[in-house]
Image (cartoon, grey):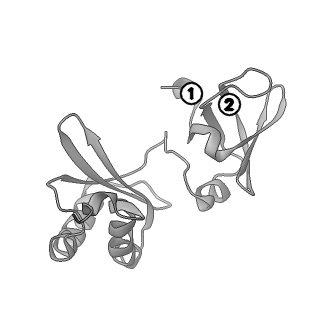
Amino acid sequence: MARPKNVQPGGAAAAVEALVRPVVEGMGLRLWDVRFEKEGPDWFLRVLIDRDEPLDTDTCEAVSRAIDPLLDEADPIEQSYYLEVGSPGLGRRLTRPEHFEALAGQKCAARLIRPDEQGRRELEGELIGLCDGVVTLRTAEGNAAFPLKSAGFVKLCDDEDLFD
C-alpha cells in the first residue's frame, strides 16, 4: 500500500515549502515556516511569511491567491485541509538555523522536554545563537546552553508571553 503523501519523507510541509518558496520570495517576502497541523478533526496548512515592515492582511491574501493554484495543481497533500497564510507574529517559534541567526540579541523563551542539569525546564533570556545544534541564551543566572532537539520550543517573546 502506498504511503499517504502527508507522511512521506520530508512530509507535506517540506513538499509545500519547495513549491511556495519561489513565489513568496518573488513577492519580496521571506518564507518563515510551513506547518501542516491537525487541530481537532481538521488539518491546517499554515504558510508563515515575514518581511522587515509589518505585514497586513492584503499581503497575506495576495500570497494566498498566488500559491493556491500551485497547490491545487501539484496536489502535494491528499486529504482536505484549510490553507492559512499569515505572519509568525511576536511569539514566533525559532525552528531553523536562519531564525536563530536573524534574531540573535532578542529576548527568547525556551521550554525543555526534560529538565537540564540545574533542574530547569523553562528558560528565558537574550538569544546568543545556535551553534552545532546547541542553543545558547544569556539568562539572569549566566549563559544557558541546551541542544535544540531537547527543546519543546524556542520562541521570540516579550515579558508578557514568556510561556503562553
Q: What residue is shown at x 79% (from left), y 27% (from top)?
A: 117
Q: Quadrant of the N terminus?
A: bottom left
- Density class for disc 2 (Cα within 10 Å; few <14, some 14-19, many ≥20) is many
- Residue 6's spot in the image, x, y percent? 29, 58
- Residue 83's spot in the image, x, y percent? 21, 55
Q: Residue furthest front?
A: 1
Q: Which residue is mark 1?
A: 162
Question: Circle 2 sits in a helix, a strand or a loop, which is it?
Answer: strand
Towards the viewer: 98 or 105: 98
- Density class for disc 1 (Cα within 10 Å; few <14, some 14-19, many ≥20) is some
The answer to whether 72 appears left or right of 36 in the picture is left
Towards the viewer: 83 or 38: 38
- Residue 140's spot in the image, x, y percent? 80, 26
Q: What residue is shown at x 22% (from left), y 60% (from top)?
A: 61
Answer with the quarter of the image where residue 28 lies.
bottom left
Q: Is residue 45 above or below residue 28?
A: above
Give the Cα separation between the discs numbered 2 and 1. 7 Å
Q: Which amino acid type is shown beneath numbered disc 2?
A: Glu
Answer with the quarter of the image where residue 72 lies.
bottom left
Q: Which residue is mark 2?
A: 124
Q: Which amino acid type is shown beneath numbered disc 1?
A: Leu
Q: Is residue 146 above or below residue 31?
A: above
Q: What residue is shown at x 17% (from left), y 37% (from top)?
A: 41
Q: Are marks 2 and 1 in contact (CB under 8 Å)?
A: yes
Question: Circle 1 sits in a helix, a strand or a loop, which is it?
Answer: loop
The numbered mark, 2 or 1, whose residue comes first in the sequence reads 2
